[in-house]
Image (cartoon, helix red, strand yellow):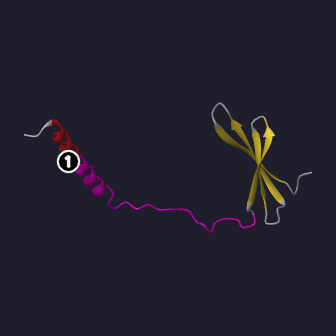
Amino acid sequence: MLDGTNQELRRIRITLIVIAILILFGARGRTVTDDYDPNDWDPNLINSNMVQLGDGYFGVLTSDNNDVYQTMKVYYFDKVKKKVIFISERDLNNME
């Protein structure tokens, strides 16, 4: 007759074997697709900097290869909901 520890180890082994069989047969026939395309990016916009605008607002400046800033995206951080909210996008070349 088995003592308590050996019985528990036997139950654990049987449970692990059943789980392994379920995983092996459950994962068959499923395919995982990846929609990421590493060539799908704008090579002219390579640099970004974050700027604090105050009262929870901040902007992300994006520049081209010559470090001339092109656009700024303005975001707001809601402290209550703990979410970042997109406000607007500004073209810095057309602003006065």
**What span is colored magenta in the figure?**
15-44
- Residue closest to the far top: 80
**SS class of the residue under badge 1?**
helix
- Looking at the image, residue 64 lies above or below residue 3: below
Query: Residue 5: x and y, percent?
Result: 18, 38
To which residue does mark 1 refer? 14
The three-letter amino acid code for the residue at tag 1 is Ile
Mark 1 Cα shell of 10 Å, populated few (<14), some (14-19), many (≥20): few
Q: Residue at x 67, y 33 (%)?
A: 79
- Residue closest to the far left: 1
Query: Residue 9: x and y, percent?
Result: 20, 43
Quadrant holding the N terminus: top left
Q: Which quadrant of the figure has residue 86?
A: top right
Query: Residue 80: x and y, percent?
Result: 65, 30
Q: Residue at x 29, y 57 (%)?
A: 24
- Residue closest to the far bottom: 39
Q: Describe residue 40's horizontal placement relative to residue 11 as left or right.
A: right
Q: Which quadrant of the figure has residue 58?
A: top right
Q: Residue at x 37, y 60 (%)?
A: 30
The magenta stretch spans residue 29: yes
Q: Describe residue 3's horizontal placement relative to residue 55 as left or right.
A: left
Does the magenta stretch mainly form a helix, a strand or a loop? Answer: loop
Query: Residue 6: x and y, percent?
Result: 16, 42
- Looking at the image, residue 48 lies above or below residue 44: above
Choose between 83 and 49: the one closer to the eye.
Answer: 49
The magenta stretch spans residue 26: yes
Q: Describe residue 29's horizontal placement relative to residue 7 as left or right.
A: right
